Amino acid sequence: MKRKNHGPDGPPPGSGASASGPEASNDRRSGGDDRRSDTTNHAVAGDRAPVTSPATDTQSFCFGENTTTVRYFSDPHTAVSPADSAGRGLTLCDRNVQHLVPEDTEPLILPGGEPAKRWAVVEQMLSEALDRGLTRASHFTVVGGGALCDAAAFAASIYMRGVAVELVPTTLLAMVDASLGGKTGINFRNLKNLIGTFHAAREIRICPATLESLSDREYFSGLAEVIKAAALGDATLLDLLDSDGEAVRARDRETVREMVHRSIAVKAGVVEADFRESGRRAVLNLGHTFAHALESSVGLGSWTHGAAVAWGIERALALGLHLGTTDPDYAARLAGILKRYGYARGPLAEVEPIDLVTAMRHDKKSGEDSLYFVIQSGPCNTAVLPVSDADVYVALAAPAVPAT
């Protein structure tokens, strides 16, 4: 089999000098959905997405004018090359999962993690597509983690003004967040996902078995997005995370399948109602204003995206408590879940608050006069609020939220 190998690997990501918690993975996507809030308050009270049964093999969602079908597979090789994938296409994968690609396929092998989210790598994808004679009727098939899914879907969205993309996410973060919802993007000048488009995948093919060989750092990176989805819209999933920690940590197949299924349903329910971010989709940014500022301040890739999001959720709880918005009992429960899975909490010695606030000012979610944060009053009860710099500094300095 001929396998084309393009693009530098880049050095392995550092572990970060944070407090305790899962860090540094080669799947560091923005995780949640990045946006600037257009109004001062988008309340989502008791917002629960319809959850399809985890026993089903497919889920279908309408994003804008397009339908995304999510299919579940038990065999990763079948997921990568299903019998019904028609038409000329280009397969792209990262080095970690190239063994999943069929022997009769010539994939373009690219770096995984943040090194994939660069203009130079997108240019390689576009050049390869052109050299192989792909037309507007062709499609990209992407096999890998969230960062590669983001970058390759972006390339597909701009090649000949848009070709179809099929995603085969192989990390938990990519399955529950990066692959779904149509947001594509690459980093620019050390800022997360500053350049991107809306381009929903035609199909997402998920094989939970691929997670069994995932490193702990990457698994817990994705688990942070599962916790976020549960907090936003699925009380049953929140209960599972709270009470079945042993099965979650052990990656029990049925437990993982249910987490993935439910997390996808939560996000899809929000995105179907607001594909292009007129307001409601902002709630998916829970924890992300803090997280993106941290990632940019300490260097993209120093923390896994999920570890940064988990810390950002805990800081959002601290901010909500300071503002009098968040119920203390709920804050203690969610902080307890974050603590139970080992995520960093409280102020960080490795980064100055002023650097974090400065980075927040460059974030796409900031307004001209205010920073916007996703704040919860309780489970499945969420709002996007303008917050003063002074209140942000208080939240950054606040001790870890008491956990139950």
Image (cartoon, grey):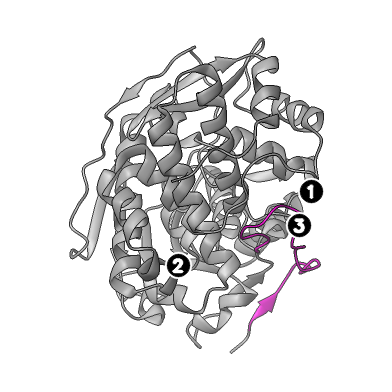
Tell me what residue is drawn at x 66 percent, y 59 percent.
23
Q: Earlier in the sequence, mark 2 or mark 3?
A: 3
Q: Disc 2 on helix, strand or loop?
A: loop
Q: CA distance from mark 3 to mark 1?
A: 9 Å
Percent coordinates x, y for residue 320 in the rendering: 51, 25
Q: Earlier in the sequence, mark 1 or mark 2?
A: 2
Residue 72 occupies quadrant: bottom left
Relative vertical location of residue 250 with respect to residue 352 in this rendering, above or below: below
Residue 2 occupies quadrant: bottom right
**Circle nearer the viewer, 2 or 3:** 3
Q: Disc 3 on helix, strand or loop?
A: loop
- Which residue is at the front of the view, 120 or 317? 317
Identify residue for label 2: 88
Count of numbered circles in the view: 3
**Residue 278 shown left or right of residue 295 in the figure:** left
Residue 111 occupies quadrant: bottom right
Identify residue for label 3: 16
Q: Disc 1 on helix, strand or loop?
A: loop
Identify residue for label 1: 299
Range shown magenta? 3-25
Please state which amino acid type lies under the numbered disc 1.
Gly
Q: Earlier in the sequence, mark 3 or mark 1?
A: 3
Q: Residues within 10 Å of mark 3 (few under 14, many from 20)?
A: some
